[in-house]
Amino acid sequence: MPDPGPGEVLIDVQACGVCHTDLHYREGAINDDFPFLLGHEAAGLVEEVGEGVTNVAPGDFVILNWRAVCGDCRSCRRGRPWYCFATHNATRKMTLDGQALSPALGIGAFAEKTLVAAGQATRVDPAARPEAAGLVGCGVMAGLGAAMNTGAVGRGDSVAVFGCGGVGNAAIEGSRLAGAHTIIAVDIDARKLEMATEFGATHTIDSSQVDPVKAIRALTDGNGVDVAIEAIGLPVTYEQAFYSRDLAGTVVLVGVPNPAMKIELPMIEVFGRGGSLKSSWYGDCLPSRDFPMLIDLYLQGRLDLDRFVSETIALEDVEEAFAKMERGEVLRSVVVL
Ligand SMILES: [Zn+2]
Ligand SMILES: [Zn+2]
């Protein structure tokens, strides 16, 4: 573990969620920079700060993020730092037996300590449980932000969410927080639909049994929803989202497709339905703005982060957690250090 360089901070990791993206790294689906140090949904304490770090100090309780904004790129300069096109990570390398490690998403928190750029650490209220707080650093933020930031769900809106894993359920919770009156959960797994109801879905649709587009129209006076959120990343569910929204509605893609996937839509429908087709990067969040706010909502009992924590595990249980995740048995297993 190198000493933190200028603009870097050393984190004493307290908890880190097990996310699908870690599995994708392990399987070589992201890049070939083995060996990886996995883990990227983490909370912990700042142990040491490098030269010039002013946003955090030793002892601060922080949530880590994987998009430290630069403040200087063409997007930041236009006042849209949540889209920052030049995010950065720590440059000093952590090593194992002398070999440099590639930290997943520039974090690498399946370890007792990790080194990140100062902008990757956001101070939040230390009253929050680390195992719940850390989840805000990735999947939960992606889902909440898909509804609250990208989709701009507001009071009285109707929303449909396709895919009720961690990200989809967070989108349901975000829609509820934002004031949506109808929240329709769509999945092919009855267990996930049951969870979606606990997170605030007002209706559920098992799309292995019925046509979700027709079912959504039936629940919305034949009109479709104001915001349709796709949290899977598949052409078939994207098209369902596209056709299940109302005129001038919004489609938000937060599920991550693979590079081979294609969608085909009649262009007249893209034009004629109006509205917007948007993609959500990390929930279009600005960690320094959103993380403290979400933790405050959590501590007030208005945002149920604990419900995402299916189990807490030890570091050596990560492989088993991957298997449970693939079988759909858990929303999140969280490593506690
Ligand atoms: Zn993740
Ligand atoms: Zn920037």
Image: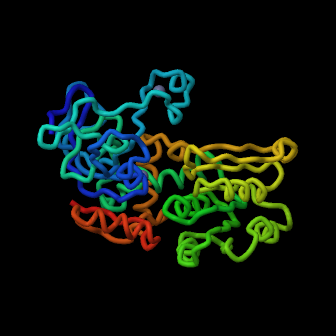
Horizontal side of 100 relative to 163 (left or right) equals: left
Residue at 77% x, 56% y: name it: 245
Front residue of 172/181: it is 172
Specify whether residue 299 is in view.
Answer: yes
Give the vertical position of 70 relative to 214 (above or below).
above
| Rendering coords of residue 126 (x, y %) | 29, 54
Q: Residue at 51% across / 36% down in the picture?
A: 82
Q: Residue furthest left?
A: 97
- Quarter holding residue 99: top left
Q: Nearer the viewer, residue 332 or 172?
A: 332
Q: Is residue 203 visible?
A: no
x, y percent for residue 323 = 37, 68
Q: Is residue 158 toward the left or the right of residue 136 in the image?
A: right
Residue 33's x, y, as percent? Answer: 32, 39
Q: Is residue 8 above or below residue 156?
A: above
Q: State whether residue 223 is above or below residue 38.
A: below
**229 on left or right of 94:** right
On screen, residue 69 above or below 228: above
Color style of the picture: rainbow
Judged left or right of residue 55, residue 254 is right
- Kindly indicate the quadrant of the structure image that contains residue 215: bottom right
Give me the residue at 61% from left, 59% from top. 175
Quadrant (top left, top right, bottom left, bottom right) of the C terminus: bottom left
Q: Give the residue displayed 37% in from the left and 31% down from the top.
A: 88
Question: How many numbered markers are drawn?
Answer: 0
Where, quadrant-wise, is the N terminus in this rendering?
Answer: top left
**Quadrant of the image occupied by residue 5:** top left
Q: Report x, y in % for residue 98.
A: 13, 37
